[in-house]
Image (tube, rainbow, N blue to C red):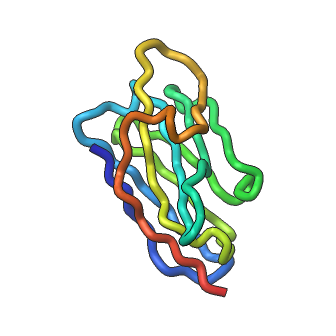
Amino acid sequence: QLQASGGGLVLAGGSLRLSCAASGLTFSNYAVGWFRQAPGKERGIVAAISQSGDTIYYIDSVKGRFSASKDHAKNTVYLQMNSLKPEDTASYYCAAAFRRYPNEYAARGMHEYNFWGRGTQVTVSS
């Protein structure tokens, strides 16, 4: 089970750090993705982290502003969001994809993920 937290209301230019904690699964065996869904829009990838945490993919609109990471010791995944913009407003979800064997693939498609957490709302006001 995954639980995302850390969302909230922030002014444009501000920062938030989202956390995704896992129970019943160990992140060191999973690739992890951060997705978001704005009202009236489809859910889409924001950042994808490989099993090891060494390979990370970001969508262009968040490159240089967002930073994703895994802490295997704490079994927690983070999404640090800086320089937030109103267009970042969305519900943010973490998801995990099991990796039977070690690999560096950072999955980007929703269908590639086995486990999903409930979203945490991020609202950026201008």
Question: Which quadrant is home to the N terminus?
Answer: top left
Work out whether residue 30 or residue 44 is closer to the camera in this orientation and state it.
Answer: 44
Q: What is the residue that sits farthest to the bottom in this orientation?
A: 126
* Residue at the top extreme of this rendering: 101
Tell me the residue at 45%/54% (across/down). 93
Quadrant of res 82: bottom right
- Residue at point 59% right, 64% down? 41
Front residue of 100 and 43: 43
Left or right of 33 in this view: 105: right
Residue 44 in picture, x, y percent from top left? 59, 52
Q: Position of residue 109 (x, y in %)?
A: 58, 38
Task: Name the side, left or right, on which 21 lies relative to 30.
Answer: left
Q: Position of residue 77 (x, y in %)?
A: 44, 45
Extreme residue in the left direction:
24
For image coordinates 66% across by 77% down, the residue present is 86
Count the marks: 0
x, y percent for residue 12? 66, 80
If the image is split into quadrants, where does the C terminus sit? bottom right
Q: Compared to 38, does 25 lie above or below?
A: above
Q: Residue at x 71, y 49 (%)?
A: 59
On the image, which quarter does residue 125 sit in? bottom right
